[in-house]
Amino acid sequence: MFMSLLSHTVSKCMQTWVYVVIPVMIYLGERMFRMVRSMAYESKILDAMTYPGKVLSLKMTKPAGFRYQSGVYVFVQCPQVSKFEWHPFSLTSAPDDDHLSIHIRSLGDWSYHVYDMFHEALRCSNLDLPKVSIDGPYGAASQDHSKYEIILLIGLGIGATPFISVLKDIANGLDKEGCAANHHSANGLRKAYFYWVTREQGSFEWFRDIMKEVSARDSKQGCDRDVQLSNKRLPGR
Ligand SMILES: Cc1cc2nc3c(=O)[nH]c(=O)nc-3n(C[C@H](O)[C@H](O)[C@H](O)COP(=O)(O)OP(=O)(O)OC[C@H]3O[C@@H](n4cnc5c(N)ncnc54)[C@H](O)[C@@H]3O)c2cc1C
């Protein structure tokens, strides 16, 4: 009885290795692939800012050959926080910008840790800013905006980040082509409506500089912006 049970267990174990080894190989392959891809693009931090609601914005050098469409995201790693964790963040810069930018809202362990490290480094001017690596760009649904004449962008809280890139891209296009005069950009876009709903008044700070830049370029109102404050948090909640 014991021998038959043992031989049955051994034969099952011989088959089980497939279910263990294949996922482990896929996992290790993905890790190595990400490591190799991240080495392809070296990006240095040019500027870092912290905003209300524990939001961190990072402005980074745009690596040579890094091309993307607005609305895409990149995976970000901060080796001082974790060598193995990569988190996705939408680019808030536009494809024509000479830099890359992201806005990170602190929501969990990793993002709080990154925020605290940058906050500390910005506070103590003798500390170097932490390093970050990027892997990407990866496509998202919002990158097809250039196919339409009229677009409606609705963003909630930090979820508006891909649309900030889209708005910047539109404003850059209007600026470059001088199309504002006839309200018609080269890719066929006539009007962009942007609705941003957020819960805290402090959130308006997050994209203030970018919005100012967009407003300055979009003098003919090719972009309509509507920002709404939906709720006020009570102290201590
Ligand atoms: C394509 C894409 C683009 C993105 N772009 C941006 C961007 O531009 N800016 C941005 O700020 N974020 C963006 N995000 C989200 C961002 O990637 C995550 O917020 C980040 O990875 C969180 O990592 P973390 O370890 O800090 O938080 P996590 O620990 O993963 O926590 C995330 C959330 O889960 C909750 N949580 C964690 N553990 C538990 C638990 N045990 N029980 C209940 N709830 C729990 C946390 O409270 C928090 O709300 C994007 C995500 C995707 C997929």
Image (cartoon, rainbow, N blue to C red):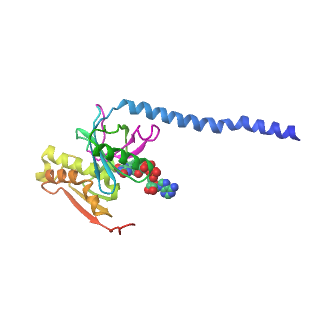
Q: Is residue 193 above or below residue 121?
A: below
Looking at the picture, how far across and down is residue 212, in whole percent?
Answer: 18, 53
Residue, far right: 1
Horizontal placement of 215 versus 44: left or right? left
Q: Foreground residue, 168 or 118?
A: 118
Looking at the picture, how far across and down is residue 126, in whole percent?
Answer: 28, 38
Q: Is residue 141 visible?
A: no
Query: Residue 11 falls in which quadrant of the image?
Result: top right
| 2 is within the stretch colored magenta | no
Quadrant in which the N terminus appears = top right
Q: Residue at 73% of width from left, 37% of height from top?
A: 13
Looking at the picture, how far across and down is residue 53, in whole percent?
Answer: 33, 57
Looking at the picture, how far across and down is residue 87, in whole percent?
Answer: 42, 44
Q: Foreground residue, 22 or 5?
A: 5
Q: Residue at 54% of width from left, 36% of height from top?
A: 26
Magenta-highlighted residues: 64-93
Q: How many marks?
A: 0
Q: Is residue 173 visible?
A: yes
Quadrant in which the C terminus appears = bottom left
Q: Residue at 38% of width from left, 66% of height from top?
A: 236
Q: Residue at 49% of width from left, 35% of height from top?
A: 31
Horizontal placement of 71 versus 1: left or right? left
Horizontal placement of 89 versus 27: left or right? left
Predominant SS of the magenta segment: loop
| 67 is within the stretch colored magenta | yes
Q: Is residue 36 above or below residue 130?
A: above
